[in-house]
């Protein structure tokens, strides 16, 4: 459905002319369609799930089992090769390339096609190219009129091989990974607003214009013992209220995701809700993801649809290119 907005001048003029006039509003009629979500990651097999379901009316409970579709024909094409995605056993409405044999190529346009009964939904995405990522120093910050130097962190990409990362994620032993430690400081200079002094600063450079840059901070040891407890006014205002488990322990959702556009991105207290090791991902998306998030994907207004690129349906078919590194967030033991 679509919000109908009239220019302010039109509304004022109408009220001056007559208070008895009624605006003629065309009622939006719900149309049941396929809902498709999928994302391609550059230089990776199709490891993300493609979701297929029927749409829901506003009055319907979300994610009813009857709405997932597990017998659709789902295909993906790069213009040269066409391959089918298979239903995931035991997971209604989920589709994958179970062979993991097709590597997603950067700068390539892919078309997704979903057919089920009389429904057809299609979408295309052009996969972003790879990009460079660095951490940069900065001397532009001050605390109580004293300069604060923000040093760069190291990514240790040569030390943290894919095999070592896979082992760490599988075993939960993150001590085998090499990562820098940064201290999470609290107080007026460090944890009060978006303008607080950052823990470190990232800079990305690309030979293309990403639709969107997403920064994902995933705490790898998100236990209540590691939760950064901050119920202050600033903490609630900028991070949202903390949740409490059955035993009364505080925690926050994990991971934290932030959409950015500027090339230099300060990562401050807002990005981190737990102490311990974090897997950080910087994701450059295609234009379709940017357009979708310009709509209303978080249902702030249920009558405004996100800007979907699915022809004949709803949802989002996007692509991305990612860089990853690790960082350890430590508590401040200085006593200051």
Image (cartoon, helix red, strand yellow):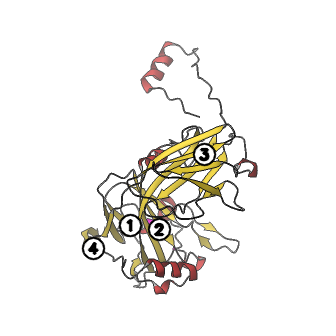
- The nearer-to-camera label among 1 and 3 is 3
Residue located beneath label 4 in the image: 148
Label 3 element class: strand
Q: Which residue is mark 2?
A: 217
State the CA–CA distance, disc 4 to disc 1.
Answer: 15 Å
Among the 4 quarters of the image, the one containing residue 254: bottom right
Position of residue 215 relative to residue 175, above or below, is above
Q: Is residue 239 above or below residue 77?
A: below
Closer to the chain start, of discs 4 and 2, is 4
314 vs 294, nearest the viewer: 314
Q: Earlier in the sequence, mark 4 or mark 1?
A: 4
Q: Which residue is mark 3?
A: 114
Q: Which residues are magenta?
A: 270-274
Q: Is residue 147 visible?
A: yes
Please report contact status of discs 2 and 3: CB closer than 8 Å, yes or no: no
The image shows residue 312 at horizontal and vertical percentages of 58, 37
Mark 2 or mark 3: name the one nearer the start of the chain: 3
Q: Which residue is mark 1?
A: 267
Viewport quadrant of the N terminus = top right
Q: Nearer the viewer, mark 4 or mark 2?
A: 2
Marks 4/2: CA–CA distance: 24 Å
Q: Is the Cβ of the residue at disc 4 closer than 8 Å to that at disc 2?
A: no
From the top left corner, tell me how far across and down residue 297 is, in percent. 54, 47
Residue in the image at 60% along x and 23% along y: 26
Q: Residues within 10 Å of mark 2 (few under 14, many from 20)?
A: many
Callout 4 secondary element: strand
Residue 75 point in image, percent of width and height: 57, 50
């Amino acid at each position: 459905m679509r919000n109908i907005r009239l220019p302010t001048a039109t509304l004022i003029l109408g009220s001056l002319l007559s208070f008895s006039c009624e605006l003629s509003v065309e009622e939006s009629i719900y149309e049941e369609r396929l809902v498709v979500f999928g994302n391609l990651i550059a230089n990776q097999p199709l490891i993300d799930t493609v979701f297929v379901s029927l749409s829901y009316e506003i009055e319907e409970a979300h994610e009813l089992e009857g709405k997932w579709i597990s017998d659709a024909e789902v295909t993906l094409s790069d213009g040269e090769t066409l391959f089918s995605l298979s239903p995931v056993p035991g997971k209604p409405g989920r589709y994958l390339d179970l062979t993991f044999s097709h590597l997603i190529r950067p700068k390539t346009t892919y078309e997704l096609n979903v057919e089920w009964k009389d429904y057809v939904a299609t979408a295309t995405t052009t996969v972003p190219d790879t990009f460079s990522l660095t951490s940069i120093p900065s001397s532009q910050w001050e605390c109580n009129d004293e300069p604060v130097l923000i040093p760069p962190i190291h990514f240790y990409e040569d030390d943290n091989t894919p095999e070592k990362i896979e082992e760490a994620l599988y075993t939960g032993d993150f001590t085998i990974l090499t990562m820098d430690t940064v201290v999470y400081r609290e107080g007026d200079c460090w944890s009060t607003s978006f303008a607080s002094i950052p823990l470190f600063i990232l800079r990305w450079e690309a030979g293309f214009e990403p639709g969107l840059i997403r920064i994902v901070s995933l705490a790898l040891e998100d236990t209540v013992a590691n939760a950064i407890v901050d119920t202050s006014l600033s903490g609630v205002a900028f991070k949202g209220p903390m949740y409490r488990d059955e035993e009364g322990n505080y925690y926050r959702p994990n991971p934290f995701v932030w959409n950015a556009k500027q090339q230099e991105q300060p990562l401050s207290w807002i990005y981190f809700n737990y102490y311990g090791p974090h897997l950080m991902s910087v994701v450059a998306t295609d234009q379709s993801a940017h357009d979708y998030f310009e709509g209303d994907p978080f249902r702030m207004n249920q009558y405004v649809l996100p800007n979907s690129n699915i022809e004949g349906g709803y949802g989002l078919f996007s692509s991305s290119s990612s860089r990853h590194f690790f960082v350890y967030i430590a508590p401040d033991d200085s006593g200051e």
